[in-house]
Amino acid sequence: MRGLKKAMRQKVRQQSPEERRKNFNEVSLGLSDEQAKAEAKRCLQCKQPRCIEGCPVGINIPAFINLILQDKRKEALVKIKEKNNLPAICGRVCPQEDQCEKFCVLNKTGEAINIGALERYAADCELNRDTGYGIRDTGYENRNPKVAVVGSGPAGLTAAADLAKIGYQVWLFESLHIAGGVLSYGIPEFRLPKVIVRKELDYISSLGVQIHTDILVGRTFSLDDLFTQGFAAIFLAVGAGLPQFLNISGENLSRVYSANEFLTRINLMKAYRFPEYATPINIGDKVAVIGGGNVAFDCARVALRLGKDIELIYRRTEKEMPARQEEVENAKVEGVKFRLLTQPVRILGDKKGFVSGLECIKMELGQPDSSGRRRPIPVKDSNFILDVDTVIVAIGQRPNPLIGKVTPGLKINPNGTIWVNENLMTSIPGVFAGGDIITGADTVISAMGAGKRAAAEIDKYIKESSE
């Protein structure tokens, strides 16, 4: 056992920084077969594995790792999918270091098992075989009752899959022309390839879930319409996609983008391949990205790949950044410049209405605030102007208010989230909600955990209602 504890954590292969900053291909190349077995061998197979406690969807982590060690990759994926319907996605974008890996006992003597890389490895082994999920459950049209899931992000996809596995007829409604929610429009290709998202969606469809795009519930259909159409329950998983701004002068200038608009144009409309694709993205040569979370780093690294000079502006220090350390380090080696302890106060414009500069003030850290991080305090008379021609604001998102505005009786909290009780039911009987729409912006895996819980609560509600 001593030898196992001393074994080094396998380093995941990557494109070199020099190459990847010139393309949108996936940065991480995953583990090789040899690396995966070596990493799986490090697992101590604890009798009381705390890593499972750290997983929001409850994957039996030691079990699937042991199957990889035995070269049973397909069986490992089956084990993962007992709890997680989107393993190839989670293996790429979930913050395992703050969840399952955080509880790994090997942290006491060295480095935790690279659970995320092993999950991705198991999923990719099957996806790379290109077996597909062409055989659909042919009996889904005759299932009863019907459940409507509104929103095809991680919470909606998870709930839909779990409900289909239980035996419900599930209709999944997406307002955009491509399903996947934030997985499709919000995460860059170099972190989450769209082919991976499509294959995971194929799997969800193979369970019998009917995915309907270009339908905006609240406009195309009301919740009452869905009940009239025979749905026994509705799950609202519409996320938190309304961008926040700084509320400073100049935010209405041309070449000021919210992170949502910028990433949607890049990801969903393939603006980075204009004119091959019809949607352009008008940015200058000197781009300021405001924020310190994962979305801010996504924006900065995208703009860098478009050949631009990037400064990431954050009002605290690197230590306080909420982004994953992996993304911070990737941005550094790729060439993103950090301007820390800096707060924008005004966006300057030229006579044509385009961004011509960004006025900032220097900050210093004071006592911790409600987030536990030290509060940034302006330094008197420290204003200065950055020479930039594009500003991307990535400081967070709020729930979209549409459904609340058009649905009488749906209780909305003061912060814009939907009110739910302890069973995730809203103020309207039979209507449930979960994920970012009730918590505010959170991680993919947290939304998936909410989707699993919602599916169980919906199943319980329908069965109790039919008694």
Image (cartoon, rainbow, N blue to C red):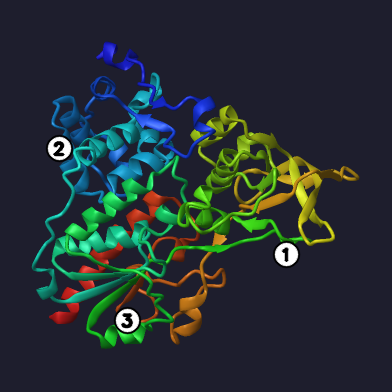
Residue drawn at (35%, 61%), measured in percent from left and top?
179
C-beta proximity under 8 Å, tags 1 and 2: no
Give, as a three-letter code, the residue at label 1. Answer: Asn
- Location of residue 434 by image quarter: bottom left
C-beta proximity under 8 Å, tags 1 and 3: no
What is the distance, in whole Å, between disc 1 and disc 2 at their CAs? 52 Å
What is the distance, in whole Å, between disc 2 and disc 3 at their CAs? 41 Å
Q: Earlier in the sequence, mark 1 or mark 2?
A: 2
Is 80 left, or right, of 242 in this rendering? left
Q: Residue reaching furthest right? A: 381
- Where residue 59 appears, as percent x and y from the top left, is 25, 43
Position of residue 72 relative to residue 385, above or below, is: above
- Is label 1 or label 2 in front? 1
What is the distance, in whole Å, between disc 1 and disc 3 at their CAs? 41 Å
Position of residue 140 relative to residue 109, above or below, is: below
- Where residue 358 appears, as percent x and y from the top left, is 79, 49
* Residue corresponding to mark 2: 74
- Where residue 238 appears, as percent x and y from the top left, is 42, 67
Position of residue 62 relative to residue 387, above or below, is: above
Quadrant (top left/top right/bottom left/bottom right) for the N terminus: top left
Residue drawn at (71%, 60%), measured in percent from left and top?
254
Identify the secondary structure beneath mark 2. Answer: helix
* Residue corresponding to mark 3: 429
Q: Which mark is residue 252?
A: 1
Residue drawn at (40%, 53%), measured in percent from left and top?
183
